[in-house]
Amino acid sequence: MIRYVVTERFSTTIRALVAGLGSDARGLIDFFTYEELFLEGGGPLGHYIFTDFDRLSRYETDSAAAFALALQSADPRVRILNHPLSACERLPLLRRLHRAGLNDFDAVRLDDGSRPARFPVFIRAEDGYGRPDTAVLGDPAAFEAALADLERRGRPLKGRIAVGYVGEAGPDGFFRKYGAFNIGGRIVPQHLMCGDDWVVKKASSKIGPDQVAEELAFIRDNPHADHLLAAFRAGGIDFGRVDYGFCGGRLQVFEINTNPSFPKFARSDARSERRTIIRSRFLEALRALDTPHGAGWVPFEETRPRAHDKRLPKGRLAASLGRIARRALMPRAPIGPGEKG
């Protein structure tokens, strides 16, 4: 069994994936919230995918790492994807990619007084998932004016970064954002969105048969797999979706989201053929991950056990308390050497 660890509030992503995979996902992948993990002080032995790092407190990140180490100690065969000790969040990822020569742009944190060495740039929240705070800023004067505007609007520099801009529209006038999953070392393309704006959040209503065919060819051919695997490795990320584009013929990684939205496999429209391909490849990659491991319950020692740092799993509290009560009445289950959990 593969367990996807996520914050309860943002578990809609994995719920949608499990629902979309239907009976094919039964016994293959499920989710476990951080709130359940921390309240119960452990979890079932198995393979784990850790996500949502930018939404965790320091206490929660430390506890997640302690649990990952406990799993590996209990059974060295378990697979830990996005290990909390090594997975990068947005800023360190972008900096690593630049230093490795995989990206042509850099990023800097603003609250320590750092300023971009090159322009154009834009400003955004490091842990945000909406639009950037500014338009593209072409020079130092525009940048300083944007900082002053943020202050006037009551937007602190804490948690904000300046990111180099490397976008360009294609000959048809569309900006393109590619998206592809890494599932334990297998690259599965998800989409090629063509948008009217430099911030591409969804496909333009103006796309036609040419753009649909271009996207389907991208899904089928998976042309950028090697480059993308190098980017994932640089960030210590084994599972997630990379969003990227091209500028001057060079692939540029914008971000890697460890808890991304997944395709709506049941939707029927002009882009449906791609969803059938993605669903098949997703299942194939997950089944390759689900190798034998032991069974049992794995506790972990909290590094900073402060009860006020814990958030209750409100939507799953009854189930969580039930497991706690049952374990209190039962001897600890042994970990079998050849069983699946």
Image (cartoon, rainbow, N blue to C red):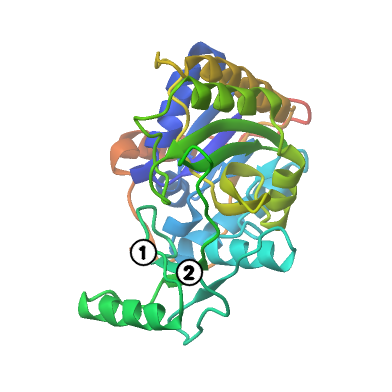
How many numbered discs?
A: 2
Which residue, as the protein is rendered here, is positioned at the far front? Answer: 171
Q: Quadrant of residue 179?
A: top right
Viewer can see residue 56: yes
Residue named by callout 1 = 135
- Residue 38 in the image: x percent, y percent? 45, 52
- Disc 1 residue crowd, few under 14, some 14–19, many 20+, Cα 10 Å: some
Q: Amino acid at mark 2?
A: Val
Asked if 220 appears above or below 177 in the picture, the reply is above
Residue at 61% x, 40% y: name it: 48
Q: Quadrant of the N terminus?
A: top right
Residue named by callout 2 = 121
Residue at 62% x, 26% y: name it: 219
Residue at 36% x, 39% y: name it: 321
- Element under label 2? strand
Q: Amino acid at mark 1?
A: Ala
- Residue 304 in the image: x percent, y percent? 49, 68
Q: Is residue 66 left or right of residue 194?
A: right
- Residue 151 in the image: x percent, y percent? 26, 80
Q: Quadrant of the C terminus?
A: top right
Q: Is residue 96 left or right of residue 257?
A: right
Q: Quadrant of residue 87?
A: bottom right
Verify CB contact (< 8 Å) between mark 2 and mark 1: no
Which residue, as the protein is rendered here, is positioned at the far left? Answer: 153
In the image, 42 versus 115, the foreground residue is 115
Q: Quadrant of residue 135?
A: bottom left
